[in-house]
Each structure stands twice: as structure tokens, then as C-alpha cells.
């Protein structure tokens, strides 16, 4: 991450003030309770590094770029026993959702099949890319920020989907409408990089807060476009508690005691930014539901699904705590942006399942599993997905999530 001149604590009070102002309208929302239709035949993923299943890795290989740190072990060690381009020791949330719905793991859109064989997108395709932001490069260039991942904004990902649609439909056993009707779209998580990248580039919290509505509207218009193309079921994640990532905790070294939530050790002002985004997103989703009553748009509350892990990590088996990274270059949270997990000098913990945080920025497979179960079988997907097609074994295994 780049160096920053923004002082987090000085903006905290102004932000808190506006946050309370913005949170109020949600009380008047009607939260739908009808479960979404089950038995999906494919999953379509959009988002950033929390969802990418290999797009950026394949992009860097095809363009002969320096391979990213997650192109190396220990990435992938827990489940795949090799790096796949996922920013995880194993399966991120999208993989758990796919498997729980009885689907294969959604292959990356930019990926070659194993041994360059043609990829089978029948059970899904993933457009999510590491580093992706909602807003495009032009938006950030106006703020004076050059984005290394400029070519992967949400609009670009939507463009890929549109480009691919004729071929997806041509291969479908039924018609295109049926294909899209029976697909589940996972629209995110996206937005975290819009905030993380700007804050660390020195943009003030007030300014970042001021463009949250623009980010949320961009997500909303992407959803509207997908609905116009024929998608009817979407799971739309909010953003995670940004104030709880080892990377942010390690970065904002100027924080004072009152910046930290005493119950979790997370940065309160950053978590409030996540909550603010998530409140606006839910208001926008409600608007879309009213415009398109035939659709089922579920809000996937990643923030609150993850929060129990930060509040009582040991209860979930995370005896090494929720804030320190398993794999990282040392320091108080075992995160150092100049020595990333995957570099030869970095040692990883022996047992990632004892950690919530994998590499400073992303969840371990063990944490992703809990979060996914909270989403699929707990209260954190609103309205809940119809999981009638989920295997009994999986449901029983997960019934202890609260
Ligand atoms: C911490 O404060 C110093 C002095 O105000 C400033 O130069 C530095 O950029 C700040 N660091 C962060 C991470 O905000
Ligand atoms: C869930 O989906 C199944 C299969 O499509 C359907 O039979 C069932 O009625 C649905 N359940 C609810 C509560 O909508
Ligand atoms: C890819 O190549 C390896 C080594 O030749 C082989 O073991 C493996 O089965 C191949 N995979 C596929 C999907 O063909
Ligand atoms: C796949 O194709 C790329 C580019 O043509 C090539 O460099 C690579 O060696 C191939 N991989 C395999 C396993 O054949
Ligand atoms: C983005 O794509 C354009 C056009 O293909 C290319 O010129 C540019 O170098 C790319 N930017 C980055 C950061 O890869
Ligand atoms: C459609 O089928 C063709 C031929 O089997 C294959 O090459 C192509 O990759 C498939 N497209 C998709 C999107 O699955
Ligand atoms: C991060 O790692 C670099 C390179 O080893 C080192 O110079 C630096 O002091 C480390 N930073 C922290 C905060 O530990």
C-alpha cells in the first residue's frame, strides 16, 4: 500500500455524525421474507479478491506480467495443495456457496483449463478480479489516483459477461432465458477496494464518504442491467468489516486507543465506513426489488456474518485470534505490505484453521466456511436462499452456526 497523510482520528467525529444521519431511513424498509427459488444450475460471480478464483493470476500469465504473490504456495495449500489464484489457503466464500448448492467451483473467466483444455462454464463462471473496484479508472484518475487494477472495474466485469452471453446461451441445453433464470448471481463483494485504495492514497475520509452513494449506485445499475438481460436471482454481498483486516490495522499506525472497538480490537471508524456502504446498499436493493418484483434480490450480510468471528474467535475454533494474519511478514498483526505472503522469506502458520485472517487482507478457508454457513443456513442472507437443493449432510454439519 502507498503511504498516506490522512489522519483517521481527526475525521472520525464528522463521519460518525453523517453516518447516524444516513442510517435512519433503513428503519422504514420492508424486508422481504419469501425465500429465493432453489436448485440453481449455475453461479455467476463478480467482485474483487475475496471472490476471484484465478482471473488475475491468469491475466498476469497471459500478459507475461510478474506473477502476483498469491501465485505461490502456501496459497491454496489447505484445499487445492497448489496455488490457483485464489487469495486464500483454500476455498473462498464463492466456492462454499457453489459447493453447498451442489455446483462445481466457478472457473475464472480469464482462465485456461487445466493443460489449456477448454473450460467448462456450464455450472458457472467467475468474473471477479483481485484489486477490482466498483468505479473505473477514469473516476479515480480525476482524484489523481492511478489504479494498478484499472482494467477490472465492475463495468469491465459486466462487459465480459455480456460478451460471453451468446456463447453461454449457445451451449445451454435450454434457452437463454431459462439459463439465466436458473443461475444465481453473486454480485460481490465489491466496494472494499474503492475505499481502501483511496484512503491509503491519502484521500480524506470525508471525501471517501462522499462518494459511497456513487459506488452503491454503480452496483445497483449493474444489477439492473443483469436483470434486464434476464437474471432473476441475485445474492448481493455488503462489504466486510474493513477495520478488522490485519492490513488496515497494521497500516493505520497513528490510531489512538479510542479508535479501536474494545470488543473486537477493530478500527471503529473504518467499520463504520463499511456499515455506511452496507446501509446504502440495502436501501438501493429495496428500490430494485420494487422496480422488478419478479426478481429475488438477497442481501448477503458479509459484515454481520463475519462479526461473530471477531467478537469471540475461540468459540469458532480460532484460538490464534481473528486479527493476526496466519501468513505474513511480521509486525503486530503479522502483516507487512513490503513482504507479502507467498514471498520466499515469509513463513506461514502451521495451522491456518486456527486463524480468521489468512494473509492480512483475506479470510482463511476456515473463516470463509463459517461465513458461508452463516449466509446459507444462518440469518445473514435476507431474504434467505431457498436451500431445498442443498445436501442434507451439509445442512446438518452446519446447523451449529449461530
Ligand atoms: C501518521 O501521522 C504522521 C504525522 O501526522 C503522518 O505523516 C503520517 O502520514 C500518518 N500516518 C498514517 C498512516 O496516517
Ligand atoms: C424451494 O425450491 C424448491 C425447488 O425449486 C421448491 O419446490 C420449493 O417450493 C421452494 N421452497 C420455498 C419455501 O419457496
Ligand atoms: C494435465 O496434464 C497432467 C500431466 O500430463 C495430467 O496428469 C493431467 O491428468 C492432465 N489434466 C487434464 C485435465 O487433462
Ligand atoms: C498453456 O499455454 C501457455 C501459452 O500458450 C503455455 O505457455 C503453457 O505452457 C501451456 N500450459 C500447459 C500445461 O500446456
Ligand atoms: C489497461 O488496458 C489498456 C488497454 O488494453 C492498456 O493499455 C493498459 O496498459 C492497461 N492497464 C494496466 C494497468 O494494465
Ligand atoms: C461452448 O462450447 C464450445 C464447444 O464445445 C466451447 O469451445 C466453448 O468454450 C463453450 N463456451 C462456453 C461459454 O462454455
Ligand atoms: C517490513 O519489512 C521490511 C523489509 O523486510 C522492513 O524493512 C520493515 O522494517 C518492515 N516493516 C515493519 C513495520 O515491520
Image (tube, helix red, strand yellow):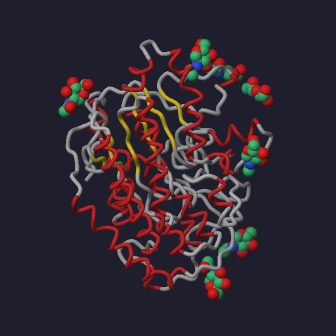
Quarter occupied by residue 340: bottom right
Q: Where does the image place residue 208, in percent across and percent down from the top left?
A: 53, 69
Q: Is residue 35 left or right of residue 250?
A: left
**What is the residue that sits farthest to the right in this orientation?**
64
The residue located at (69%, 23%) in the rendering is 115
Q: Is residue 264 above or below residue 400?
A: below
Q: Where does the image place residue 317, in percent across and percent down from the top left?
A: 38, 56
Ligand 1 quadrant in view: bottom right
Q: Where does the image place residue 353, in percent across and percent down from the top left?
A: 46, 52
Q: Where does the image place residue 202, in percent across and percent down from the top left?
A: 63, 73
Quarter occupied by residue 232: top left
Q: Is residue 118 left or right of residue 61?
A: left
* Residue 246 shows in this picture: yes
The residue located at (45%, 19%) in the rendering is 176
* Residue 67 shows in this picture: no
**What is the residue that sits farthest to the top in this orientation?**
173
- Pick the front one: 142 or 82: 142
What is the total number of numbered labels drawn onto the structure image?
Answer: 0
Quarter in which the N terminus is drawn: bottom right
Q: Is residue 69 left or right of residue 248?
A: right
Q: Is residue 74 above or below residue 26?
A: above
Q: Is residue 2 above or below residue 130?
A: below
Q: Is residue 171 above or below residue 34?
A: above
- Pick the front one: 141 or 338: 141
Amino acid at each position: 500500500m502507498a503511504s498516506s497523510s490522512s489522519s483517521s482520528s481527526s475525521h472520525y467525529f464528522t463521519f460518525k455524525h453523517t453516518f447516524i444521519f444516513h442510517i435512519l431511513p433503513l428503519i422504514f424498509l420492508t424486508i422481504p421474507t419469501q425465500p429465493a427459488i432453489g436448485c440453481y444450475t449455475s453461479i455467476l460471480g463478480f467482485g474483487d479478491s475475496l471472490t476471484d478464483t484465478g482471473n488475475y493470476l491468469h491475466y498476469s500469465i497471459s500478459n507475461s506480467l510478474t506473477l502476483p504473490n498469491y501465485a505461490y504456495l502456501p496459497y491454496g495449500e489447505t484445499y487445492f495443495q497448489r496455488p490457483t489464484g485464489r487469495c486464500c489457503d483454500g476455498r473462498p466464500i464463492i466456492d462454499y456457496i457453489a459447493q453447498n448448492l451442489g455446483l462445481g467451483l466457478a472457473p475464472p473467466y480469464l482462465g485456461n483449463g487445466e493443460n489449456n483444455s477448454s473450460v467448462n462454464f456450464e455450472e458457472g463462471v467467475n468474473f471477479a478480479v483481485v484489486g477490482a473496484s466498483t468505479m473505473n479508472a477514469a473516476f479515480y484518475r480525476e482524484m489523481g489516483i492511478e489504479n494498478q487494477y484499472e482494467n477490472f472495474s465492475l463495468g469491465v466485469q459486466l462487459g465480459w459477461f455480456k460478451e460471453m452471453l451468446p456463447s453461454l446461451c449457445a451451449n445451454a441445453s435450454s434457452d437463454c432465458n431459462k439459463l439465466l433464470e436458473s443461475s444465481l448471481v453473486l454480485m460481490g463483494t465489491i466496494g472494499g477496494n474503492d475505499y481502501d485504495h483511496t484512503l491509503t492514497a491519502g484521500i480524506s475520509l470525508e471525501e471517501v464518504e462522499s462518494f459511497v452513494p456513487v459506488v452503491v449506485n454503480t452496483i445497483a445499475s449493474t444489477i439492473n442491467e443483469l436483470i434486464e438481460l434476464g437474471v432473476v436471482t441475485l445474492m448481493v454481498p455488503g462489504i466486510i468489516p474493513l477495520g478488522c483486516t490485519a492490513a488496515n490495522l497494521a497500516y493505520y499506525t497513528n490510531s489512538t486507543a479510542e479508535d479501536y472497538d474494545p470488543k473486537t480490537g477493530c478500527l471503529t471508524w473504518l467499520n463504520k465506513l463499511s456499515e455506511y456502504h452496507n446501509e446504502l446498499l440495502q436501501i438501493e436493493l429495496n428500490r430494485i426489488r420494487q422496480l422488478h418484483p419478479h426478481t429475488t434480490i438477497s442481501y448477503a450480510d458479509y459484515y454481520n456474518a463475519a462479526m461473530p468471528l471477531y467478537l469471540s474467535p475461540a468459540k469458532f475454533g480460532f484460538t490464534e485470534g481473528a486479527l493476526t494474519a496466519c501468513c505474513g511478514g511480521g509486525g503486530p498483526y503479522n502483516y507487512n505490505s513490503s513482504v507479502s505472503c507467498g514471498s520466499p522469506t515469509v513463513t506461514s502458520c502451521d495451522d491456518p484453521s486456527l486463524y480468521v485472517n489468512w494473509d492480512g487482507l483475506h479470510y482463511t478457508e476456515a473463516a470463509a466456511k463459517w461465513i458461508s454457513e452463516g449466509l446459507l443456513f444462518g440469518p445473514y442472507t435476507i431474504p434467505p436462499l431457498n436451500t431445498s437443493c442443498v445436501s442434507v449432510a451439509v445442512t446438518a454439519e452446519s446447523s451449529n452456526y449461530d
